[in-house]
Image (cartoon, rainbow, N blue to C red):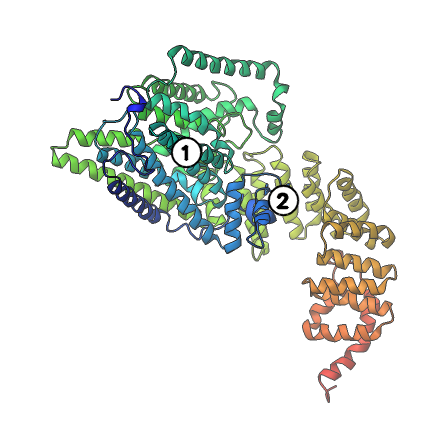
Amino acid sequence: MPKNEGECVCSPSILSMGSSDPQKNIRSTTWFFFLFFFLIFLAYQNSFQSSWQLDDKPNILKNHRIQPKQLSLPDLWQAAFARPGSGGFFRPVACVSLALNWYFGQENVFGYHLVNFMIHCCSAWLLFLTICLLFSTPRLVGEGSLGQSQFIAAVAALLWALNPIQVQAVTYIVQRMTSMAAMFSLLAMFFYLKARLCKNLNQKRLFFLGSVIFYLLSILSKENAVMIFLSLPILEVCFFDRLFPRPIVYRVAGGIILLCVFLSVLLVLQPEVFDFILHGYDKRIFTLNERVLTEQRIVLKYLSQLFFPAPWRLSIEHDITLSTSLFSPWTTAAALTVNLLLILLAVKLGRKQPLFCLAVLFFFLNHLVESTFIPLELVFEHRNYLPSLFLFLPVAQGINFLLIKVHDKKKMTAVIIVCMATLISAEGYATYIRNQAWQTEVSLWLDAVVKAPNSARPLAVLAIKLAWGPDPNEAKLRKALELTKRTLSLRMSRRQTDAAQLGNVAAIYSKLGEYQHANSYYEKALVIAPEDANNRYGFCVNLITTGDFLRAEAEITKLLEKGFVHADYYNMMGFINLWTGQPEQALPFIRQALKAAPFRPDILITLGKCLSSLGYYDRAQWCFSLAKQMGRKDPIVSLCIIENALLANQVNRANDELKYSIKRFPLAAFFRPLQAPSHEKFREVPLASDIIIAYVRSELPKIMAQFFPGKK
């Protein structure tokens, strides 16, 4: 073994692993890429048409910043500020890639899945290359042949890539942020190793520069990749001769421990210092201490899933009992003990078993961001994608050790190879099965209902699919109502989820026409979360439907006074004033609504009716015509145009619109808005029904005679 790193022989070629024949090396590593591609494709072949899920919608489908109209730098730059909802700088590398997908394929999921799949294949190959490079480091150089190092690297990479727990990071489209962060992290580590092994100073600098660039790209894909910087000392300690004198290492380690102790004491004595973190727990059902304690068990659960990844153990939702203290439940202390023992064992064996040390320390280190104090949801399987990169190295090393031990026993060798092939095949098949659950939103959440029966979210999502999906008939609405009510007694992920579910119950009752029940549930929801704008707006819509305009006005006023700026709120206030006969008061609100959402057909109709009521008939006609051009071509628009024309004494215009309506709509559909019951009448702007009906009755025979001459 070399006495110092300067003596390590390593080819400057990026793909070279120390072989004397770089071309042969390149061919062999390329062959491994195609092997990975083929096996991963077999496992993921049923994922390319999986539907949009969960955060895909706010991040992509409803995020106009990530939907470029043309392939230009300004449009792509806009994607870098595509934080859902408020906008702002947000994971720009991943977001730009999603923007490119949108430009070429819009809502077609195939392109997104194809890119995610290729990122996963590239990550598997980069993992293989990085592991191979570890065998050129001072600690491992000479440990086995090139073939043995490639065998270990290939097995470890396949066990990682085909593990079904990775489905959530690959098939879940928006988690490209996670997979891209891992891919660039691997590149950063690979180039760092190349720099450390390279003898040429200029090439060393280029490799270090490449490592820094890929590290930044990983962070700009997803922030949890920041821990890769702290992973490099693990590579140094495990695979290189000591870089610094022992006293300096001890002082740095002691300083890190003292800093951790200081921060812990500060958290206990002066928690207000951490308000920027603690504020996030206001919306959670757990405290910071409960999360940190619970995550000890969850990380151990992740390890069990990774090493026993049966599809029935994987889900988008998990039932997790909170840890309120070290011994409640008792498994908290047990999990913490096991985790600490694993870390201490890895540190102790760092010199003798560097691959085991890397696997364990890298796993726990890269779980620090998402599995400690930050107020995220408790558990998501995609959080293992980056931390588990090197986790299967000891397994691959063990298989290689067994093969060496029995190399002269053909039967034993065959048994080990068959067992290894069976293991890899079983993982691939489990991934294929797991991908079936991700085919549609309904299949994903039906799967979660079975695996997490005490969680509210799966039932809530299924209820929404029934009540707001295609053909929401009464049977579906009743079932949705039952599911939503059941969620109220189950575990929620946020403190105010109860209010959201009460609001959903109210909305379903409204769909069923049971408005009094709906009002009572809206009131309960607003007691729990008075700042919930969605529930208050839904309550207002329900009050208007029942004709309670005064109370609806009071409720919408509360929204506007709290500073909520939304076109719907202003339009609703104008709508209420129209129904209460106050068009002068309605006009400023409707103009505000149009300013917030220009050319929206429903707002144009409200504005047109307001202008018509104030005697501005030509302006009203312009609004109604524009609403029709914007896609609103139902009887309401035609009736508004006819009424406005009659009020303006423009009978010819009224006749033209009536002829258009008779050609376009069945008579029953045309008259329905004029004869609607009260609970339907208040959904549209007020119409002078008597005037319109009298006019239509007088003109209809003449118009029908034109269409059918010679018939009475």
Identified at 68% across, 72% down, the residue is 664
Q: Nearer the viewer, residue 662 or 626?
A: 626
Q: Please tell me how many numbered marks the rendered image carries.
A: 2
Left or right: where does residue 290 sit relative to residue 611?
left
Q: Which residue is mark 2?
A: 505
Left or right: where does residue 37 sit relative to residue 701?
left
Identified at 60% across, 22% down, the residue is 274
Disc 2 packing (10 Å; few <14; some 14–19; many ≥20): many
**Image height of 154 relative to 360, above or below:** below
Picture coordinates of residue 432 (x, y %)?
Answer: 36, 46
**Image height of 671 relative to 365, above or below:** below
Identified at 41% across, 14% down, the residue is 249
Q: Label 1 is placed on what type of residue? A: Leu
Picture coordinates of residue 111 (x, y %)?
Answer: 46, 52
In which quadrant of the rendered image does the C terminus lie?
A: bottom right
Picture coordinates of residue 518 (x, y %)?
Answer: 68, 46
Question: Is the C-beta separation of discs 1 and 2 under 8 Å?
Answer: no
Disc 1 packing (10 Å; few <14; some 14–19; many ≥20): some
Q: Quadrant of residue 286?
A: top right
Q: Nearer the viewer, residue 539 or 273?
A: 273
In which quadrant of the rendered image does the N terminus lie?
A: top left
